[in-house]
Image (cartoon, coloured by chain):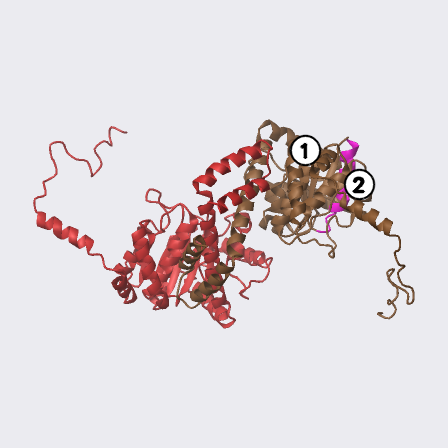
Chain colours: A brown, B red
Amino acid sequence: MAKKNKHTSALHEKKGVSDPEITNISHINKFKKKRKAQPDAQSLTQDIISGDITALSRAITLVESTNPTHYKKASEIIKQCLEHANNSTRIGITGVPGVGKSTFIEAFGEYLTSQGKKVAVLAVDPSSSVTKGSILGDKTRMEALVNNPNAFIRPSASGNSLGGVARKTREAIILCEAAGFDTIIIETVGVGQSETAVHSMVDFFLLLKLARAGDELQGIKRGIIEMADAIAINKADGDNIKAAKLAKVEFNRALHLYPEKASGWTPKVTLCSALQKEGIDDIWKIISEYLTKTKTNGYFEHNRLEQNKFWLTQTIEEQLKQRFFNHEVIKKALATQLQLIEDNKTTPFAAAEYLLNLEKDL
Amino acid sequence: MAKKNKHTSALHEKKGVSDPEITNISHINKFKKKRKAQPDAQSLTQDIISGDITALSRAITLVESTNPTHYKKASEIIKQCLEHANNSTRIGITGVPGVGKSTFIEAFGEYLTSQGKKVAVLAVDPSSSVTKGSILGDKTRMEALVNNPNAFIRPSASGNSLGGVARKTREAIILCEAAGFDTIIIETVGVGQSETAVHSMVDFFLLLKLARAGDELQGIKRGIIEMADAIAINKADGDNIKAAKLAKVEFNRALHLYPEKASGWTPKVTLCSALQKEGIDDIWKIISEYLTKTKTNGYFEHNRLEQNKFWLTQTIEEQLKQRFFNHEVIKKALATQLQLIEDNKTTPFAAAEYLLNLEKDL
């Protein structure tokens, strides 16, 4: 097999054919100059607000950059965009792999744009990277939406920490809103803690399920069913309809076991077939009802404010921990204290006190 | 009603009868001197190690005190006790109110002492206070165990924060172990986060359940079933036996849905009747099997070390947060930043950065 596939790569270079030499210096300089002429924060912001998608993409790239200069520029842009942001509906969508998220988002996005909405699709997936195929990474799975002028799709920012990815996504939301997108869809994979992060940045949380999936225990255990404002049972088509209807009854029963939500909203269960584009309008109807209810009873605004407080506190706490535990002096002292604990010479509490006092004097 | 009860208090003072004057000054001085003559840390430690229960009680009182002088003394005692501690089996017991925890602990404690064990019973209940009737608060519910010379019962330390109560309990464990108690039972109520705290300080975690209680969803949701090393279905007596046997089958099935435990132990489900003192020996048999297994495969030691690390990190993180958010300058600046967020003038992340930089210069 290995031998057979040896020359199948399109990148294979034939022996004896070397790269042509670049001789046109003026061309190179022109290219370099163009590269340098990056627009400043002010003009990028102006372009974003006027709805320029290229400017939006560039700004999100700056947000995602690990280069401090880039990030400083991104912060300026975000600050200027803030007064043009916040006027959107933020919808979180989760579901285990195989539930049909991409197909659903494509159908849902198409429906929304047909209703005159401008839709941005972002993703939170801390496990994503260039090498791993990840959600939204393969835009070809949403071909129609990619080519839709009223839709903007951006794969998940890469990064190892959920906090980092979540921050970048929260900032991308602001930029998309400033660029005029009125419906923001945040997709997440149904694994790990990413649902909780997404739940903390959206107005409405939609859980996609399959009939007879048998993963109800996982959903309950990880608190995902508790977070859902609606459960849509996807692939409710063909032979599957009967099982889907049964699942609807069961999820409705399960939802009644939970206490009433702070939003005053009773979570709904609905059926859909993203493939057949059926039941998609029902989901938007549910979301509209939710928006009317929570904007009337004040929960909508209250929730956004609480989310901001949550991210503020979360960021500070994470930074405090990092500062402390990454300090070289603390690192060494911590190792010593851990050894003392292991040798029954000190308690975790006495060791903590010692380390905290040590840090005060640094 | 109010009028009728006006004079029913034993503390009611009759008019015209005033307190007798204290004339014996020498008596007062004697009393004061005795009060002052509190044993020092060194001698208290000696008494604890020799198994003196009064000294143990005194030391725990010092641990629970909010007076810094007392606490300093307590720390010295704990440090000296450490090398005599750790040689016990620490068992966590939880279950919702009504499951029969007190009756169970009484029966279990009696059984253990009859087997030559020395049993200390502590509790973690952050909601407990003098006014609220709380677990272990009413020792009369464990009358036999209270009067058992080989048992020591201590109600939950009071306090508003779970972290504070947990710390006091962890330190009380060390003192009890130094005093020669070889089996430490930590009781907790089946509400709030206290189970997680108790789970992080014991070797074995026992969940008490009732047949047909219908609170399985809660248990799964809050991860309690996942933490259990054994589930004992209590009140399996009389007409209840059939239902209890059925519940046993169901819990066994539920437990199989969880991944294998790091301990390599497969959780067991068993029936008991604390009232009839039936099935109690089976529970001890299960715990003994667990101890043999985890002491052989190294998990027992590993787990205690991990628990120590957990409490060390936990304590530091809590203190870092408190230090930061309780600082007067930060408090004021935080209020300003929250207002700026509400007015769309800044983001939670920019605000966090501002506050963290502010704190650096304090």
- Up-down relation of residue B247 to residue A299 (above or below): below
Task: Assess disc 2: are there few (<14), some (14-19) or many (≥20) residues with their C-alpha within 10 Å of its C-alpha.
Answer: many
Residue A215 horizontal side relative to residue B358, left or right: right
Q: Nearer the viewer, residue B335 or A361?
A: A361
Which part of the image, by quadrant, shows the N terminus of chain B? top left
Identify the residue at image location x=43%, y=61%. Answer: B91
Q: Which residue is mark 2?
A: A145
First in sequence: mark 2 vs mark 1: 1
Q: Amino acid at mark 1?
A: Ser
Residue at 43 percent of width and 40 percent of height: B328
- Residue A88 bears which disc, if any? 1
Q: Is residue A305 above or below residue B43?
A: above
Chain identity of mark 2: A
Q: Where does residue B110 sit, x and y in percent of width and height?
A: 34, 62
List the single residue furthest toward the right: A16
Up/down of B184 relative to A291, above or below: below
* Numbered circle sitting on residue A144: none
Q: Where is residue B144 drawn, in percent x and y? A: 30, 57
* Host chain of mark 1: A
Residue A131, picture quadrant? bottom right
Q: Position of residue B61 (x, y in %)?
A: 30, 54
What x and y, as percent, mark residue A71? 65, 45
The local secondary structure at tag 1 comes to: loop
Residues flagged by tags 2 and 1 on a common chain: yes
Q: Which residues are magenta?
A: A97-115
Query: Residue lying furthest left in this view?
Result: B23
Residue drawn at the location 86% of the way across and 49% of the way down: A26
Q: Is residue B28 left or right of residue B134?
A: left
- Left of B32 or right of it: where is B125? right
Residue A104 belongs to the span the image colors magenta? yes
Q: Is residue A354 visible?
A: yes
How dense is the environment of label 1, judged by Cα within 10 Å: few (below 14), some, or many (20 and up)?
Answer: some
